[in-house]
Amino acid sequence: MGKGFFNVPIAINEPVKSYAPGSPEREAVLATYKDMWNTKIDVPLYINGKDVATGNTKTMSAPHDHQHIVGTYHLAEKSHVEDAIATALEARKTWSQLPWEHRAGIFLKAAELIAGPYRAKINAATMIAQSKTVHQAEIDAACELIDFLRFNVQFMTDIYHEQPESTSDAWNRLEYRPLEGFTYAVTPFNFTAIAGNLPACMALMGNVVVWKPSDSQIFSAKIIMDVFKEAGVPPGVINVVFGDPVMITDTVMDSPDFSGLHFTGSTYIFKELWKKIGNNIHNYKTYPRIVGETGGKDFIVAHKSANPIQVATAITRGAFEFQGQKCSAASRAYIPSNLWETVKERIIEDVRSFKMGSPEDLSNFITAVIHEGSFDKLAKYIDQAKSDADAEIIVGGNHDKSKGYFIEPTVIVTKNSKYTTMCTELFGPVITIYVYDENEYSETLKLVDETSEYALTGAILATDRYAIDEATKALQNCAGNFYINDKPTGAVVGQQPFGGARASGTNDKAGSALNLLRWISPRMIKETFVTPTDYRYPFLG
Ligand code: NAD
């Protein structure tokens, strides 16, 4: 920045629209949904600012109506991935030198495009592609993505302001360079905001990107790319490839110029990618940065002093919104014996009141799970619980994939604190509850800490402050995002930076400066004003 110290607009969270009957946003989103539903789109790769149709295509359909085709997308060959890498490296020559205010301008414009002209489109696409209710689409595709784009610009300038001390004869400057080479974004199906943020935040910091979205999110990823294009992301800065994830990843990671992985998805895949990077480590020009936000087995613990209705609501909202397919969704709960009957009654009443079906019918609270693989896995665990002696299904338990991948919200109660669904991430609308002796709170906290390999989110509900303090200490290492008297979902950018440790990831906290720090490599510049001319120090005399 040569000609001024520019302030960026103060980032504010995008207000969530209500979509109440009669509201203009409700009409707009439903009309857009209908249009998109009845028009088949074709999604090419996007390399060097150009659409690339490979001719090798796959169809896309909605999880709630898998026979209805909404479009096709093109699959990359190895040569396309190589083109994406080459073009990114070429674009780096100019992008990495562009003054930061222009990068900021592009992504701030992207935020405003989503807030305005693209809002209905990106929400409707997310309702179709990922079967989100309009509220879930609004808080994800519109608001969270807007927040990421706005707040990251502010965090970027906060970082740039961090400068070392200087003296009168030497001026010390820290320059926050982008990484040398190109970066790789691999994104999950479940959040349109994450899909947009992972490539965008690396590009914002001056990096060039090859982005591979999830096969199940391409319909809404297309809108993100349309926004980036209209906002003015130059050709080659963000290149998008679809197709065989192993071939794409191998091609990317075989390149000596690969310099960073920004991954969100399941734990097993992330560990496989880390292994590949390790195996190639002697080939790289620089040590690749590795950021991964992965699985969870998120918990709710209630203390005997908690309000049982609040506990039940934390469970029904925390476990079942978006069919439990939030990485933060509650999937195991520990309820004290004194509260159990009231909590149980309210959960059953709530779950029975849920309506399930297409997101186009705005009165539905529950829609379909993402794909057949997920449906079959969930159905298997539910059916197993029906026959296991140490498990009992108290509500839900049905599933039907004839039209869409519908799994009834299901509550399993177990007497075995290590029952399989207390430990394994299922990623669906299933929660398992263990009722503990109300006088064994400390022992139960230890159990919570030791039951799963993950450490993403968790919640304690209690009115007794000593109990809250005890849980905060005992559960320090088993949740990167810890909630007191709330459900464990719903992190907001700029307010609750998000991420977990242990098997849940590298805990680099999306939606904060901590994450952006991973995509820069500082250069220290010391400028001396009066340069010495004699090697002899005074003490030598
Ligand atoms: P996934 O692991 O199946 O897929 C994630 C991405 O990895 C996709 O783009 C996919 O195509 C790609 N991929 C799959 N196999 C690959 C391979 N062998 N090599 C390279 N890439 C491969 O995850 P998903 O089903 O899309 O998302 C759900 C998972 O993501 C859950 O485990 C959830 O907990 C996690 N998640 C975590 C966070 C977080 O912030 N911690 C956020 C969202 C989702």
Image: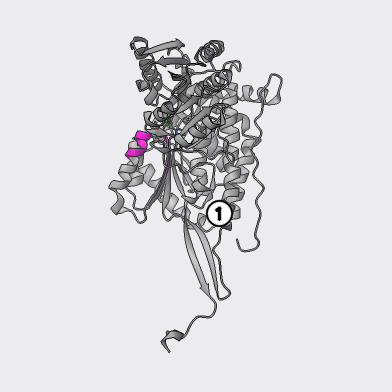
Q: State yes or no: Cβ of the residue under disc 1 lies below 8 Å from any atom of ligand 1.
A: no
Give coordinates of residue 511: x percent, y percent.
54, 42
Q: Residue at x 49, y 21 (%)?
A: 323
Q: Residues within 10 Å of mark 1 (few under 14, many from 20)?
A: some
Q: Tell me the magenta residue range.
A: 262-272
Quarter holding residue 428: top left
Quadrant in the picture for the C terminus:
bottom left
Q: Which residue is mark 1?
A: 159
Q: Is residue 60 above or below residue 166?
A: above
Pick the front one: 327 or 415: 415
Q: Residue furthest bottom?
A: 541
Give coordinates of residue 432: x percent, y percent.
43, 19
Give coordinates of residue 127: x percent, y percent.
55, 24
Q: Residue at x 44, y 50 (%)?
A: 88
Ligand 1 lies in quarter: top left
Quarter holding residue 419: top left
Q: Is residue 143 above or below residue 290?
A: above
